[in-house]
Amino acid sequence: MSTSYQNFIDGKWVDALGGETFENRNPADWEEVVGVFPKSMKEDVDRAVKAATEAQKDWKKVPVPVRGAILTKAADLLVERKEEYSRDMTREMGKVLTETRGDVQEAIDTGYYAGSEGRRFFGRTVPSELPNKAAFTTHLPLGVVGLIAPWNFPMAIPSWKSFPALLAGNGVVFKPASDVPLSGTHFIRTLIDAGVPPKLLNLVHGTGGSVGGPIIEHEGLQGISFTGSTAVGKLITRVSADTLKRVSLELGGKNAQIVWEDADLDLALEGVLWGAFGTTGQRCTATSRLIIHEAVHDMFLDMLIEAIGKLTLGNGLEEGVDIGPLVNEEQLKMMVDYTQIGLEGGAELRVGGEVASDGALDKGFFFKPTVFSGVTPEMRIATEEIFGPILSVLKVSDWDEAVAVHNNTDYGLSSSLYTKNLNLSFHAVDDLVAGITYINAPTIGAECHLPFGGCKGTGNGHREGGWGPYEFFSETKTVYFDYSGALQRAQIDTEEV
């Protein structure tokens, strides 16, 4: 019998008001039901916003270091629960256990970082242009914010959003992706157990249409933080404009690893295998394009194809498995479609390109790691986000061509260059249009204390990770304190005074 789970609204674990539910199944074994969850609607979102609004009135008065101590406690609890949460995450979204442990660890690190921010949530003291007058800034919370997270990092990305939002003094309405509701439940339960006021933090399960839409349309929310597709991000921007919500968008990517003629090819090979096929290619920072200098193109491509043949697909809970399933059947069908698109576009399929269904794999959504060579910059597989284990290989002859090929995309998230040339490395920092550049490292591997995000179709300029979200989730208030005892006029031409 399947375990049933609930929303967390107004300080209580409750069913959806409409009574509807949905099943959460294991993508490696579709016969396994991980749990049954409430399919919520607008009425549930309304209850969550109302509860958070009331609780936030008291939370904003709690000293910031005290808020930070609660978030530190949450990180401590995540350490204790790491293995349980990691195994459940693999069951519901598929990536291998070493990766889900890393996912929970990212939440742990983010929690400790947030805790430390509680004692350095600094404003600025600025000299006034007038005598006997002080000027400084402080931070105020936005109010109540809506957080909408994706399925590929079910605990790391919610932590990137929730910890800064709470530290800044906000109430939270959180919608996890419907593919990973159990991880969302674990995360919220941990925060509540750590001492976050129950009514302040609300968990609403459901689909993008039934819950996500009401969140972005809700007039009681002052901010939205969303991670997902560029198409949905544009929709959120349009809808949120009517209520002037503050919006942070972390969207798609079409990231490239460049391998130069002087690169350490063994190191570059490890990088592209991890960047392209880690998390089954289901990362916004995944290496979707491999740009190789013509001098080493053929050699490196042969090395890559040989190495891919040694990768093992399977259930992520099993030892020795390198690549898990895609998260659902829709993603699997998309890989089949993009393989056909690549073939029809004239690219050469070198390895993979088909559903893996041998033995136990036929119970899940497995797709073989796929490489296309002979790809040109204008092909669809070279420009569109695929979000799966399909890699496009492009050949270049000089740096200007490499930069042009790299930048020929609507996205600008992550980039990578393998080279021993120090000068070229710094040119890459200047020339590659991306929010992140790695030198001699793959396109994946964000650290929680550094800004994460990109440009062009990747987002709207805000950053997650590091100090950016603490600024996003707070209002900067400027304070002028005049102790002169007389009227002093700033912004007046001194020659006329």
Image: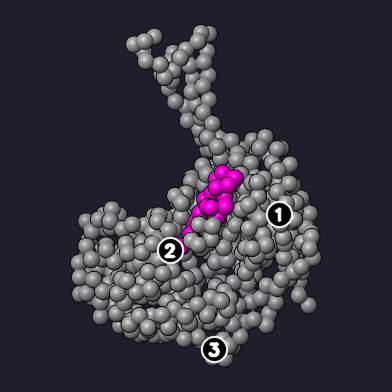
Residue mark closest to the camera, 2 vs 1: 1
Residue mark closest to the camera, 2 vs 3: 2
Q: Could you say whether the residue bearing mark 2 is in a helix, strand or loop?
A: loop
Amino acid carrying mark 1 in the image: Val
Query: For the C terminus, which image quadrant?
Result: top left
133 relative to 53, above or below = above
Q: Residue at x 66, y 76 (%)?
A: 25
Amino acid carrying mark 2 in the image: Gly
Residue occupied by mark 1: 45
Could you tell me if residue 112 is visible in this image? no
Q: Position of residue 390 (x, y in %)?
A: 42, 77
Which of the 4 image quarters holds residue 257?
bottom left
Query: For the N terminus, which image quadrant?
Result: bottom right
Residue occupied by mark 2: 253
Q: Residue at x 53, y 8 (%)?
A: 485
Residue occupied by mark 3: 357
Amino acid carrying mark 3 in the image: Ser
Q: Does the magenta stretch include residue 84?
A: no
Could you tell me if residue 425 is visible in this image? yes
Q: Could you say whether the residue bearing mark 1 is in a helix, strand or loop?
A: helix
Magenta stretch in the rendered image: 236-252
Q: Which of marks 2 and 3 is nearer the N terminus?
A: 2
